[in-house]
Image (cartoon, grey):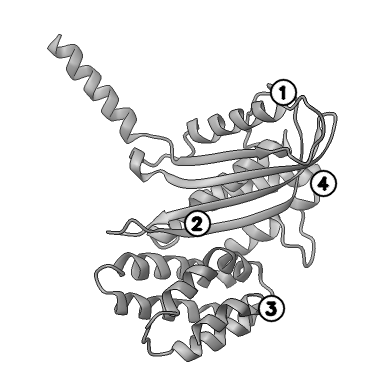
Amino acid sequence: MHKLTSLFILVFSFFSLNAQELNCLVTVNSDQIGGSNKQVFTTLQQSLNEYINQTKWTNRIVKPEERVNCAMTIIITSRDNNNFTATLQVQSTRPVYNSSYASPILNIKDNGFNFKYNEFDPLIYNKNSFDSNLVSSIVFYVNIILGIDADTFSKYGGETELKEAQNVMLQAQQSGISSWQNVVGKQNRYALIDNLLSPELKVYRDLLYNYHRKGFDNIVKSKASAQQTIETSLLTLERIFNKTVGNYLIRLFFDAKADEIVSMYSEDAKTRNKQRLIQSLRKISPNNNSKWRKLD
């Protein structure tokens, strides 16, 4: 009996230490679709929740409390038999060391999330081929979530996951679906992973690490020092802006971070270059000028 108890503890400990990486809430909203039979949407929601949260996506050893908290919200806008037109909102957060605060990392809205789905279709991903826009899109964003999250904890720590997202994109290009294609001026899945892995734009991934690991993770220990580090890291975004005006990564960052930045610097923040930071924010993210005014 003692041996059986020890074996149970050993097995339980093994699976606890090898938990899946994501704690993801998937919601499928079909309010815009008429009709009373909406069971297919309930089934899809349940299947996606199980698929994302029960799949082991990496070789990392992850404790249950280390799983990445995230959400995917699918809003169905039209349906034609088994063809669905939808938008997909992808969000994730990251814990801050010695704090109960969760810092937003991603807030992406994909307006080109169209797919085919029959109720009870198995969700199977083959990394060497393109079989389903639904599955490929979900796997793509899973790897984006994991890659960017890892980048905030160690420098370029998400390289493997971002390369996997790139592979998903390359396989999906054969479909001809525009979201996977290199279209000039289009902020789509191709542009997202192409920018994240671009050597010329690597300063963005440096920012993710410096802002979070060197900045926010020290905010409880020394708020003033952390604010200065975060300010310095934010100013590096000008280097991206000067390379390509309207770069996707700038929008990506501020869609997640604008409110957080306002909250941090609208108080009595006395950093060395606060006025320069405000000017920089207005220059590189004018769409958020109504928020930046709160920093004056």
Q: In the rendering, at what x and y percent does residue 81 appear?
A: 85, 29
Which residue bears the numbered disc 2? 148
The local crowd at label 4, few if under 14, some if 14 to 19, many if 20 or more residues have their Cα within 10 Å, is few
Comes first in the chain, label 2 or label 4: 2
Please tell me the numbered disc located at residue 176: 4
Please tell me the numbered disc located at residue 119: 1
Judge left or right: residue 112 versus residue 151. Answer: right
Please tell me the numbered disc located at residue 245: 3
The local crowd at label 2, few if under 14, some if 14 to 19, many if 20 or more residues have their Cα within 10 Å, is many
Question: Which residue appears at 72% of the width and 44% of the height?
Answer: 172
Of circles 3 and 1, the one toward us is: 1
Cα–Cα span, label 1 and label 4:
25 Å
Question: Which residue appears at 49% of the width and 75% of the height?
Answer: 262
Q: Is residue 48 visible?
A: yes
Quadrant in which residue 84 is drawn: top right
Q: Is residue 158 visible?
A: no
Residue sitting at the far right: 80
Comes first in the chain, label 1 or label 2: 1
Question: Which residue appears at 50% of the width and 88% of the height?
Answer: 296
The local crowd at label 1, few if under 14, some if 14 to 19, many if 20 or more residues have their Cα within 10 Å, is few
Residue sitting at the far front: 36
Comes first in the chain, label 3 or label 1: 1
> Residue type at mark 2?
Ile
Comes first in the chain, label 3 or label 4: 4
Judge left or right: residue 48 versus residue 158. Answer: right
Q: Secondary structure at mark 4?
A: loop
Q: How many marks?
A: 4
Cα–Cα span, label 2 and label 3:
22 Å
